[in-house]
Image: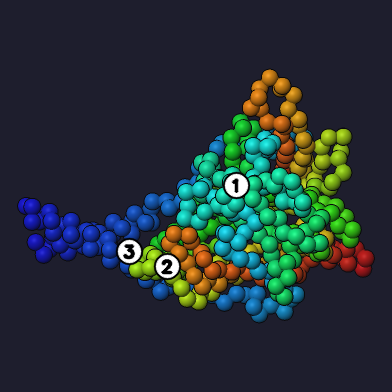
Amino acid sequence: MFKTLIFGFLLGIVGTIAAIYYLPVVDQYRESSIITVAPNGGNTEAFHMNIPMDRIMIGAPDQAEPVPPGLEWPDGEAFSGLHAELFKVRNADDMVIGVASRVASESEEFGDSIEWVVHLPARGTLHISIPPEAVDGDSRVGTLRAGTREFGTMHGRVSERWVANTDDEDEDAPDGRIELETILVGEFADEEQEETS
Amino acid sequence: MIRLLIALVVGVVLGAIAAAALLFYNPLAARNKLSPLSVSDQEIISLAYSAVAQDAIVYTNDGESRVHPRPVKVQQLWEAPIRRTDVLVTVLSDSRNNPAGIGIKFMSDSEQTRLINGDALVDSAWHIVLPERGSLFVSQTENYWNFLRQIVVPAYWSSGDSWKGMWHGNTTIGPGALGTARVWGGYGEFAGLDSEAVEAISARAYSVAEGPVAMEGSLTIEVANRVESQAAELVTN
């Protein structure tokens, strides 16, 4: 019986360590990435946020109806030129795949700026900088400043535009949506092109 | 036969407990290293924030975690791809404790977590806007193993379901080779910045029911390697 106890003891140690080693503690849920190849090269991916349902926060001074209710945006001159928003981010299939922040800053010294940070837990994070001036009337075009993990070696353009809802029949339809479209190229592809040329 | 089976089961249970204790008390796992930025001769920015959710402007998670979202009616991150993600929006204070800007922190449990190595990892990113200076993006991997081992588990073992004391530790372990976070500048005086940072937390009280009760976080950011300005200097020369 004592030998069985010792055998069980060793089995328990080995089994526990094997389970901790092999069983994943964290397994992030993944939606399939919906990526298309742009005609002139690069990968195109579209993200959007339905407004108002995907808006988690609007951080701005003197809001009559703060989002979320009960939000206390800090007072002070330092925060007067800031307009910060938080969103849930959806893919082209309208599935939530991440969260994002958008901060618009007004500054006499540095000029106006718009920045996005798009965080996709299973894939990585993008830091996007967009000039406030619209191109073609309805969209702004900026650049990917930095990316992590899957986006770590990427660079390219990102456009932002507001698309109003025109379906008056559906009462539950959003007012519209903010679309973010990325056209990104990996650094490895560039290096290959340079070598070829 | 039944005796042997009971002996086997008891042995397996004791072995499992012994293995868990070995991992938990492993002194080689996740040692708290000195921040490499503490000996830096570059300009350093120090930003502090309250790491207590109820002090935040907004804190949200899946709504089922120990730490409750704030404000109460904030949208929760219940969808499957973001269920293991927390978002914190907070005021960042400078070294004189004056409000310096806003920080938005995204934190997702990392699939690289390996408890056997003492790694309880979180992939996190900061979107920092300091209106009078510019913006920063900080990406890092954090390890909360020491925090779990020295604060959270003792809180569960305590008869009062809480922990009190003084604990300070760096949470940043990468992606930098020296265990530092990667920092990119956005606009303003930080435009073109490519640098490093370290995040640390100082805890004084923790409750099983509410999570951190008295806890501050700090970001130490090295302001160096201004890519654009260096490039401009080279062009000028």
Q: In this view, does A124 lie above or below B227?
A: above
The residue at the point 51 percent across, 48 percent down is B63
Q: Is mark 3 on a helix, strand or loop?
A: helix
Quarter assignment of residue B141: bottom right
Q: What element carries label 2?
A: strand
Residue to which mark 3 is pinned: B20
Chain label for disc 3: B
Residue to which mark 1 is pinned: B74
Q: Is residue B21 above or below residue A16?
A: below
Frontmost of labels 3 and 1 is 1
Q: Is mark 1 on a helix, strand or loop?
A: loop
* Mark earlier in primary sequence (3, 1): 3
Label 1, label 2: how far apart the Cα atoms are? 27 Å
Residue B106 percent location from the top left of the image: 61, 54
Chain label for disc 2: B
Residue to which mark 2 is pinned: B162
Residue B224 lies left or right of residue B201; in this view the side is right
Closer to the camera in the image, B148 or A83: A83
Residue B103 lies left or right of residue B122; in this view the side is right
